[in-house]
Image: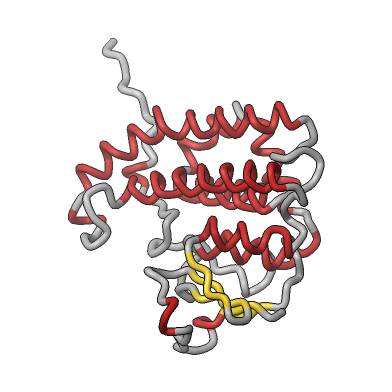
């Protein structure tokens, strides 16, 4: 089957999690909006927002749902139902995590520019880096520790591992100063990133023009004012 992926052509965003799965599996797909402005899909199955995937007569939206559909077909999910449900839960948690990353620079509303909510963004980013990000990292580090195989489900890479790779890559870009010390305290997560990066098809994708660079329009954005790690100096 040839898959048709619809997502914004200028950014990685939520579509990148799907691209990584398709690329790792060497799937036959076209990133439609990078080639045209064709938004065609069955009118009785209109998605709420991008991304969405067209597979034959199926139109599937929402990144976790798309990956849940693709996982067994791309051999990136377990064969048993319990395993697939557990994998889907992990992906949904990553989706929550990604939303919190987005809200560091757009805490009030997506319709406002970052420059219109700088003060609120600084407070939100500080809370994210101090409280929320460590909780997510601790959780996935624990999942990997219990899995005892190097990946979230054990020894075999899943689509959630590809997504965890993307989270690490994005956090390195958005918060290079603040994320560094946290990453060092979560070696299993860092190891997943390293393993995924050298998977042959992923490595080829990362080195190609198909991989859109991180930029200031995507979910992961680098604003130095939000990447705060400086401590107040003590008076002498």
Q: Residue at x 41, y 76 (%)?
A: 46
Q: Is residue 151 above or below residue 165?
A: above
Where is residue 31, by image quadrant? bottom right
The location of residue 222, given as percent across then percent down, is 41, 52
Relative placement, left or right, of 236 versus 180 is left
Q: Residue at x 37, y 29 (%)?
A: 230
Relative placement, left or right, of 90 versus 127 is right
Q: How many marks?
A: 0
- State the residue in front, 233 or 208: 208
Q: Is residue 189 above or below residue 235?
A: below
Relative placement, left or right, of 127 versus 67 is left
Q: Is residue 99 above or below residue 66?
A: above
Q: Is residue 86 above or below residue 29?
A: above
Q: How is the image coloured?
A: secondary structure
Q: Residue at x 42, y 80 (%)?
A: 44
Q: Residue at x 77, y 38 (%)?
A: 154
- State the residue in front, 140 or 71: 71
The location of residue 151, given as percent across then percent down, is 73, 40
The location of residue 213, given as percent across then percent down, is 53, 65
The location of residue 101, given as percent across then percent down, is 41, 46
Relative placement, left or right, of 86 versus 41 is right
Q: Locate the N terminus by quadrant.
A: bottom right
Where is residue 26, by image quadrant? bottom right
Q: Locate the C terminus by quadrant.
A: top left
- State the residue in front, 213 or 19: 19
> What residue occupies the far top of the structure in this picture?
236
């Amino acid at each position: 089957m040839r898959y048709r992926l619809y997502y914004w052509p200028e950014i990685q965003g939520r579509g990148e999690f799907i691209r990584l799965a398709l690329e790792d599996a060497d799937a036959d797909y076209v990133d439609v909006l990078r080639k045209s402005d064709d938004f065609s899909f069955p009118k009785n199955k209109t998605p709420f927002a991008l991304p969405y995937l067209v597979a034959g007569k199926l139109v599937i939206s929402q990144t976790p749902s798309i990956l849940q559909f693709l996982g067994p077909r791309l051999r990136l999910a377990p064969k048993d139902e319990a395993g697939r449900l557990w994998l889907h839960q992990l992906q949904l948690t990553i989706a929550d995590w990604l939303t919190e990353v987005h809200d560091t620079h757009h805490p009030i509303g997506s319709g406002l520019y970052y420059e219109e909510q700088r003060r609120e963004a600084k407070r939100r980013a500080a809370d994210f880096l101090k409280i929320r990000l460590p909780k997510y990292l601790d959780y996935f580090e624990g999942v990997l520790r219990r899995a005892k195989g190097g990946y979230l489900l054990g020894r075999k890479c899943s689509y959630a591992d590809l997504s965890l790779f993307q989270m690490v890559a994005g956090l390195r870009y958005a918060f290079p100063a603040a994320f560094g010390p946290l990453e060092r305290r979560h070696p299993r997560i860092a190891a997943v990133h390293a393993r995924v990066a050298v998977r042959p098809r992923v490595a080829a994708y990362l080195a190609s023009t198909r991989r859109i660079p991180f930029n200031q329009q995507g979910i992961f954005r680098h604003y130095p004012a939000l990447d705060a790690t400086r401590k107040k100096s003590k008076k002498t």
